[in-house]
């Protein structure tokens, strides 16, 4: 079996982290948060809390990357800390829901903005499917080609967000009239925060995908931790700036009243031309998210196949491009199927709940590896452990609960099906080599 090429550096790692997080959420979800949180102080506080959770997650994954370099990201951490069954469940749910669903959601948003922008006479699902197929083909050409594509798109995304922030700074502020919101009892306030955190954390989600390419980094023990912390920190700053800008230009009520806050901000400052410019930025943002995830997520299935937990052909690497082509194609097939099956808001609910099941387990893995004395070269530790690590676990449980009983039930069903599939694989492996 050929090995993956080590061609990525610290800058690549940082941009991969940022590209994995910044998608369409920051251009749409501020209005959803404002509908729940109502007041500017609470809106900013929820985004800040979400950023703190994301940054804590970044530190957790930075330590995991230091302690377990070249282990294939979250899949490898769960395998080494707990049991191959837990790792299999992660790969199983990533293919069925988390990663494929994230690709599908981003593809749908891209299609919704890109189609009208260029007056494309095609249905959004078909545009989304075509985009996923094209970007998957690019990544099949090799990791350097795929990484370069996502790096260029990531820089364009930062420029688009920068333009939005600049527009908010120089635009006329909204009237403060009617900015107050009715008081709520403490119990309702906590429920409000929990509900607002769902769209916030969906927007912040994605930092965990960067370690999937640790086999392709030149210096995993150094490049990945630095890229993780730097990338998450930069995204937190950008997201807070966009939120503050939205509140300044539209006000809390205006932000809550629109489903396209970025377009409204740009139109208020620059008119129709500004609205079209930000539409291009949103299309590029979702395109970059797609490119990033198509680059990183197939490495999960590559690692599973290497561990003989999945079909061996999925672990094959193209002899010329050194890319896991079969894994990339498999991911694209499931993403396209979900795109044609579910709507955007259904997808993000399932994805958020499922993601935090395994993100919480990743935090528990810190305790496991520390107790074993497992460490790599250098030294990257979670600051404030164990308090900060426990904080992240509690936040993860709260997210799963806040996602609602329907998503929780669906998560349980998929996990149960994964356990059954793993049991069948074990029985099959004892009698016949996996091919």
Image (cartoon, rainbow, N blue to C red):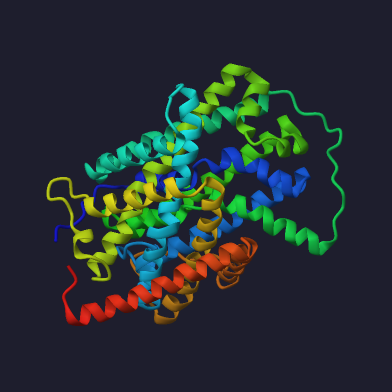
Tell me where residue 429 appears, x and y as whole percent. Answer: 22, 78
Q: Residue at coordinates 50% horizontally, 31% vertically from top-left?
A: 113
- Image coordinates of residue 280 in percent, x first then y, are 49, 27
What is the count of numbered marks? 0
Res. 184 in view? yes
> Where residue 261 appears, x then y in whole percent?
64, 34
- Residue 314 in the image: above or below residue 308: above
Q: Residue at x 63, y 18 (%)?
A: 270
Q: Quadrant of residue 61?
A: bottom left
- Quadrant into which the C terminus falls: bottom left
Q: Work out whether 283 lies above or below 210.
A: above
Q: Is residue 285 visible?
A: no
Considering depth in this image, is 426 or 342 the residue closer to the camera? 342
* Residue at figure coordinates x 18%, y 50% from the top left: 322
Left or right of 135 on screen, residue 390: right
Nearer to us in this view, 122 or 244: 122
367 vs 161, nearest the viewer: 161
Residue 169: image quadrant is top right
Name the residue at 66% across, 21% down.
269
Residue 201 left/right relative to 302:
right
The picture places residue 18, in percent across and down from the top left corner, at 46, 45
Quarter of the picture containing the N terminus is bottom left
């Amino acid at each position: 079996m050929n090995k993956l090429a080590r061609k990525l550096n610290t800058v690549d790692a940082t941009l991969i982290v940022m590209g994995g997080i910044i998608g369409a959420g920051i251009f749409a979800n501020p209005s959803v948060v404002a509908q729940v949180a109502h007041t500017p102080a609470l809106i900013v506080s929820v985004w800040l809390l979400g950023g703190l959770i994301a940054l804590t997650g970044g530190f957790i994954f930075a330590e995991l990357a230091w302690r377990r370099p070249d282990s294939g990201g979250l899949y490898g951490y769960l395998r080494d800390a707990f049991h191959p069954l837990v790792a299999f469940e992660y790969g199983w749910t990533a293919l069925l829901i988390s990663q494929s669903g994230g690709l599908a959601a981003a593809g749908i948003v891209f299609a919704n903005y890109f189609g009208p922008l260029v007056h494309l006479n095609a249905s959004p699902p078909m545009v989304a499917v075509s985009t996923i197929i094209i970007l998957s083909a690019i990544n099949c050409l090799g990791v350097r080609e795929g990484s370069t594509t996502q790096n260029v798109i990531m820089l364009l995304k930062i420029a688009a967000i920068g333009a939005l922030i600049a527009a908010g700074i120089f635009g006329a502020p909204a009237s403060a009239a009617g900015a107050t919101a009715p008081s709520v009892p403490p119990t309702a306030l906590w429920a409000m925060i929990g509900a607002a955190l769902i769209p916030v954390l969906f927007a912040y989600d994605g930092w965990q995908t960067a370690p999937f390419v640790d086999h392709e980094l030149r210096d995993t023990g150094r490049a990945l931790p630095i890229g993780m912390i730097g990338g998450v920190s930069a995204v937190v700053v950008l997201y807070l700036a966009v939120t503050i800008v939205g509140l300044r230009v539209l006000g809390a009520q205006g932000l809550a009243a629109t489903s396209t806050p970025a377009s409204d901000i740009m139109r208020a400052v620059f008119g129709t031309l500004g609205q079209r410019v930000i539409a291009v930025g949103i299309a590029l943002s979702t395109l970059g998210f797609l490119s990033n995830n198509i680059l990183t997520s197939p490495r999960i299935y590559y690692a599973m196949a290497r561990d003989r937990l999945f079909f061996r052909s999925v672990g094959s690497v193209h002899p010329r491009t050194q890319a896991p082509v079969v894994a990339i194609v498999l991911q694209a097939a499931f993403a396209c199927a979900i795109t044609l099956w579910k709507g955007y808001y259904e997808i993000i609910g399932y994805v958020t709940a499922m993601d935090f099941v395994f993100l919480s387990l990743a935090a528990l893995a810190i305790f496991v590896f520390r107790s074993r004395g497992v460490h790599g070269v250098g030294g990257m530790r979670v600051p404030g452990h164990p308090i900060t690590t426990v904080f992240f676990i509690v936040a993860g449980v709260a997210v799963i609960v806040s996602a609602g009983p329907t998503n929780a039930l669906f998560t349980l069903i998929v996990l149960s099906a994964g356990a059954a599939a793993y049991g069948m694989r074990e029985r099959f492996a004892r009698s016949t080599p996996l091919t």
